[in-house]
Amino acid sequence: MGSRSKAKPAKGRVKANGKPRRRWLRWVLGSTLGVLLLGMAAFVYLYETVQLPAANASATLQANVYKTADGKVIARSGTVNRENVDISQIPVGVQHAFVAAENKTFYSDGGVDVRGMARGIYNTVAGKGTQGGSTITQQYVKNYYLTQQQTISRKFKELFISLKVDQEMSKDKILEGYLNTVYFGRGAYGIQAAAQAYYGVDVSKLTVPQGAYLAALVQAPSQYDVATATPEGKQLALGRWNYVLNNMVGMHWLDAGTRAQAKFPQPIQPKGTPGQSGQTAYFIDEANHELTSNNIISDQDLAAGGWTITLTIDPTKQRALQNAVKTQLTSQLDPNARKVDANVQAGAASVDPKTGYVVALYGGDGPPKHFLDNATRQDYQVASTFKPIEFASALENNAQTQDGRQITANTLYDGTSGRVVQGSAQPFGPSNEDHVNYGDITVQKAMDDSVNSVFAQMAVDVGLDKVADTAVKLGMPAKTAGLHDGPAIALGTMGGSPLEMAGIYATLDNHGKLVTPTIVKSVERGGQKPDLKNPIGGQVISRSTADAVTSVLTGVVNSGTGSAAQQDSQVAGKTGTSDSNKSAWFTGYTPDLVTSVGLFGEDAKNHSQVPLYGVGGVERVNGGGFPAQIWGSYTRAALSNESPQQFDLQTDQGAAVQSDAPSTAPSASASPSAPPSTKPSTSPSTSPSTSPSHSVPPVNPGPSRSHIPSPPVTGGGTSTPPDSADGSTQGGGPNNLDAPGRLPQGG
């Protein structure tokens, strides 16, 4: 037999004595140690060689450029509003508030938060946003020495410079530098400018609660400015303020008893964008708010400047809107002859329903006369412009009346003024305007004439939570105050803005696909182009529901309270007049344009809400008056170069497709305090009407009838309810003034 050679072990294979494995381990350990030593050497080298750069917080500030949709530059911003102060001028309690808010370990740490930096670097690499943990020292370095650019190199520079600053400067000097460079919103850099912008005082006069609010602002200046924030933003700001004060107690910088007695320090009204006036100031404020509140650009990065922001504003339509307000309203006001004329504020927003672009916006006289943007303010009741939302909810939820019939445009309801709603644990019997009794009328007729008693009952029939849910789906913020106020929501007791209502009606115009209005068309800086959110969303209600509501709303314009808004094109819309005549609305749309116009009673001196009675020599201002006239004049001019359009509707109900629905003429009650009729309506039909979707409407199936009787009033009454500043409706509830034939100025 031949001899066999002894097999050699494969390279790297472990022998019984384990020698190859030990060599591998030694190699790994040696390499790791080498990398660590190199890393440490590099760290020491960089630390020793990196020098503190020259301060560039002011030098690097650039102007932001704002353009209209046609590319024309309308504004540049970038003026620094800052006055440096010594740390000794800042009350110690205020200093502690910022440390408690931003960096509780400030007085003991080494100037950097390694874990926070790692998180920030990871977020930058992964594209998950620009937020990462930073100490006060790091924020000071970024603000004073570096830029707001979110890059890996900038973050490493921040690390080494922060370590060096912490070694070479006292904590008081670092805190002083931070407080003099941080951005607070309202164009204010540094705490001295912030003290003046938010409280109108020198920094030395700030109280601890005021300082805690300024410290809370740093996290999100535009979102947390309670003077202009959304209801949700206000809640977040209050929560952040409480967080700061509670931290101060935990760090023994504030007595628990003093903390318990602290009240939120309401800031003064903002003075607008520095250097900007008129409508341009409103454009800039809204664009900046949209960019920062949606986390597209941080407040600090936006304030650093260099951005080119193209707006969606169409100059031709913008001129048409401003001219309509002038010719239909302001030219008719004479504050010298009628003091009430000085209390009128107008706001309007116009949106393209196909793109979501805000093509025109009117916010008031503009700074320096009026700083608050009336197009985006949310503090006045939307009144009867909410009724289409309620009807949409009825259709979307296949709701039925109390006696079990489907709710459609043809369903009959009892329109007796002051009739107490059935099926509600909360007594509610709202009056119709002038206490007119309509008897049995269709939903279509009730929408045309804005009959309160019908929609109060419908809200209960649909379900109050379902109505609120539909409102949110259509674009109303979920935390809107008053959205869960019981049956009164049917009359629009919640606050809203013209821009918000334009978005909701644009969603109806867009066949149920969500439209979230945007005023920013594009934004870029040096090749950097942040992604913008798509204004057009998904289907939030069915097309058949949206089209049916549109069809019904054409009746409001053709034969109801909105006749002043008639155009060559088909128009759908709704009037609204709030409790005590403090606001009046018309929100309407053609197939191509949606516009919401609001008039608000605001005391010219103290800015409180006041009635609009007597404005322009008119006994009372209704939605079908000035608002509808402004809407009509603007829309006529805005669409003057376009052919008349008709809605493309897939529905078999509503005024746009039916002309033979019965109606019942209203009858005035004997007196405002006369009780409503107790006569029951007739028996219902055996076949309730339904609302399938059809491109070609079938023969009108006729109305269904509700035989719910009108019982004697036991809780609501028919008398006009007392004024309620907070929109509450105890007693009779809001008295929405929208009835036809009683509208001044052709409404």
Image (spheres, rainbow, N blue to C red):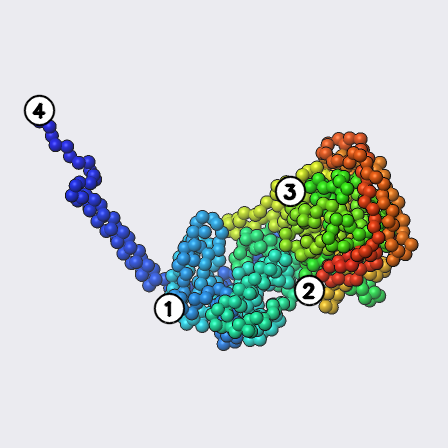
60 lies left or right of 726: left
Q: CA distance from mark 1 to mark 3?
A: 57 Å
Q: Residue furthest top?
A: 1
Three-letter amino acid code of the residue under disc 4: Gly
Residue situated in front as seen by the camera: 476 or 458: 458
Judging from the image, what secondary structure is the residue with disc 2 in?
loop
Residue situated in front as seen by the camera: 136 or 275: 136
Closer mark to the observer between disc 2 and disc 3: 3
Q: CA distance from mark 4 to mark 2?
A: 109 Å
Residue drawn at (58%, 52%), measured in percent from left and top?
309
User: Label 2: how many residues lie within 10 Å, few (<14), some (14-19) or many (20+)?
Assistant: some
Q: CA distance from mark 4 to mark 3?
A: 86 Å
Sequence-first disc among 2 and 3: 2
- Asked if residue 75 can be seen in this view, the reply is no
Q: Which residue is mark 1?
A: 167
Sequence-first disc among 4 and 2: 4
> In which image quadrant can residue 570 be found?
top right
Q: Which residue is mark 2?
A: 368
